[in-house]
């Protein structure tokens, strides 16, 4: 795909679809500005070339209506601080007022359109809304890796109407995943966790033939335990996925991929802070307990195995890391990756949150800004937002 480096942006009006969907705290402030920071290289690149930069993004899921606390003005303020230049927050994303604000821009100016999801047309891909956005610019840039799995107006509609290229963040994300999926240095391990196996089935299907080692942790390990005939107490068991898990185990065995489950787990009465918790062997989970984390034996074994790998991709926490007493397994895996002399790719969503929270993000090769988008790529599928961009063609 073409990127902003392949085209002339000088003096042009450039519409940049970014993923500035940051988490907000209870006071409505930005809880983590990782995604805003990740969008800076593209914005700086364009400003340095005197482009007129028109940024757009969604924030949360306002369902097609204006929600005051989800206005993008607070994101514009943070951008302005980080860039050390003004970023004007507009009160809408299409219409006459937006058009006149854009007409008044000079080279190097930056505006941020209002939350795209205040309009139901963003999700439905309404042609008039697409025209309204496309009419603001000469060139379209997709830098919203995290939103590129959504076939929305600003992601797949507008690139059909303008010259459309990838931004620097999108390029970096795609490069990181392509490198490990197509040409990993070996041994190559995947660590897959999270609450539900059903969220990760396609990822597991795609990743098993590529890896040497697969480590499964988190709540979804329960369904694998059940498949091996262990009791799982009150843990969430996806009974309708037992067949699928059996097939995955068989596929791994057939391909000579080692599949490791935690040999021990932390079980609790409830998944709440302060709930009594003990470590038990995975085959001896008491009936009235729920799996909250992998055990210390599992953390030791996983760390040892991972330290021998040259490439590791990780998606899904090992336990309920948001609760400090159940965070240890996730923290130990994060530390093992941080210490690895090799390539480490953190596959987005809550795994990225965990690594950022532990202060280890800078020690990873790549920390993805995408949640669902990273899962889509790890499942081996093409992102609609990427498919919609112009091809680079033959060199
Ligand atoms: C994300 O948070 O993964 C992206 O910003 C996409 O958000 P969405 O799941 O609401 O489309």
Image (spheres, grey):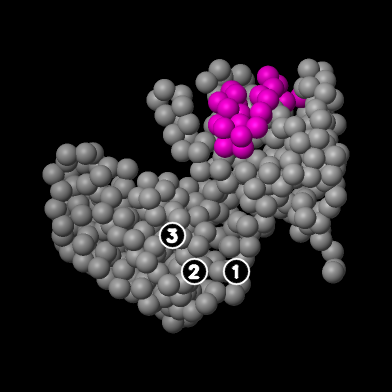
- Residue 235 in the figure: left or right of residue 386: left
Count residues near mark 2 (Cα–Cα under 10 Å), then give few for <14, some for 14-19, many for 20+: many
From the image, tell me which residue sits under label 1.
179
Quadrant containing the C terminus in the rendered view: bottom right
Q: Of callouts 3 and 2, which one flags the residue occurring earlier in the amino acid sequence?
A: 2
Alpha-carbon span between mark 1 and mark 2: 10 Å
Alpha-carbon span between mark 3 and mark 1: 18 Å
Q: Of callouts 3 and 1, which one flags the residue occurring earlier in the amino acid sequence?
A: 1
From the image, tell me which residue sits under label 3.
363
Asked whether the residues under the numbered discs 1 and 2 touch, taking CB atoms below 8 Å apart as contact, a structural biologist would say yes
Q: Which mark is residue 343?
A: 2
Q: Which mark is residue 31?
A: none
> Residue at left 15%, top 48%?
277
* Magenta highlight range: 71-94
Q: Where residue 10 sits in the image (x, y, percent)?
A: 84, 44
- Residue 126 in the figure: left or right of residue 269: right
């Amino acid at each position: 795909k073409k990127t902003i480096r392949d085209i002339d942006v000088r003096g042009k009006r450039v519409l940049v679809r970014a993923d500035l969907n940051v988490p907000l705290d209870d006071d409505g402030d930005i809880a983590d500005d990782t995604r805003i920071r990740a969008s800076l290289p593209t914005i700086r690149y364009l400003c340095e070339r005197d482009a007129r930069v028109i940024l757009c993004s969604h924030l949360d899921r306002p369902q097609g209506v204006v929600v005051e606390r989800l206005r993008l003005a607070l994101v514009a303020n943070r951008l302005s601080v980080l860039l050390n230049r003004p970023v004007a927050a507009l009160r809408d994303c299409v219409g006459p007022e937006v058009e006149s604000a854009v007409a008044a821009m000079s080279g190097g100016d930056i505006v941020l359109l209002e939350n795209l999801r205040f309009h139901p047309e963003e999700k439905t891909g309404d042609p008039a809304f697409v025209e309204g956005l496309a009419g603001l610019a000469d060139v379209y840039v997709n830098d919203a890796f995290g939103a590129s799995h959504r076939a929305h107006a600003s992601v797949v509609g507008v690139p059909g109407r303008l010259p459309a290229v990838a931004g620097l963040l999108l390029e970096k994300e795609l490069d990181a995943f392509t490198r490990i999926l197509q040409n990993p240095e070996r041994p190559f391990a995947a660590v897959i966790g999270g609450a539900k196996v059903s969220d990760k089935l396609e990822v597991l299907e795609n990743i098993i033939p590529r890896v040497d080692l697969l480590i499964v942790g988190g709540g979804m390990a329960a369904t694998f335990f059940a498949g091996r005939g262990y009791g799982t107490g009150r843990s969430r068991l996806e009974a309708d996925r037992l067949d699928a898990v059996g097939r995955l185990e068989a596929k791994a065995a057939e391909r000579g991929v080692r599949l490791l489950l935690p040999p021990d787990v932390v079980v609790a009465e409830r998944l709440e802070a302060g709930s009594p918790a003990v470590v038990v062997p995975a085959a001896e989970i008491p009936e009235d307990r729920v799996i909250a984390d992998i055990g210390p034996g599992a953390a030791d074994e996983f760390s040892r195995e991972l330290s021998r790998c040259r490439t590791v991709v990780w998606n899904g926490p090992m336990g309920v890391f948001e609760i400090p007493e159940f965070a240890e397994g996730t923290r130990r895996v994060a530390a093992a990756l941080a210490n690895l002399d090799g390539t480490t790719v953190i596959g987005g969503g809550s795994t990225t949150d965990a690594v950022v929270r532990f202060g280890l993000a800078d020690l990873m090769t790549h920390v993805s800004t995408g949640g669902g988008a990273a899962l889509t790529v790890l499942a081996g599928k093409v992102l609609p937002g990427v498919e919609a961009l112009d091809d680079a063609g033959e060199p």
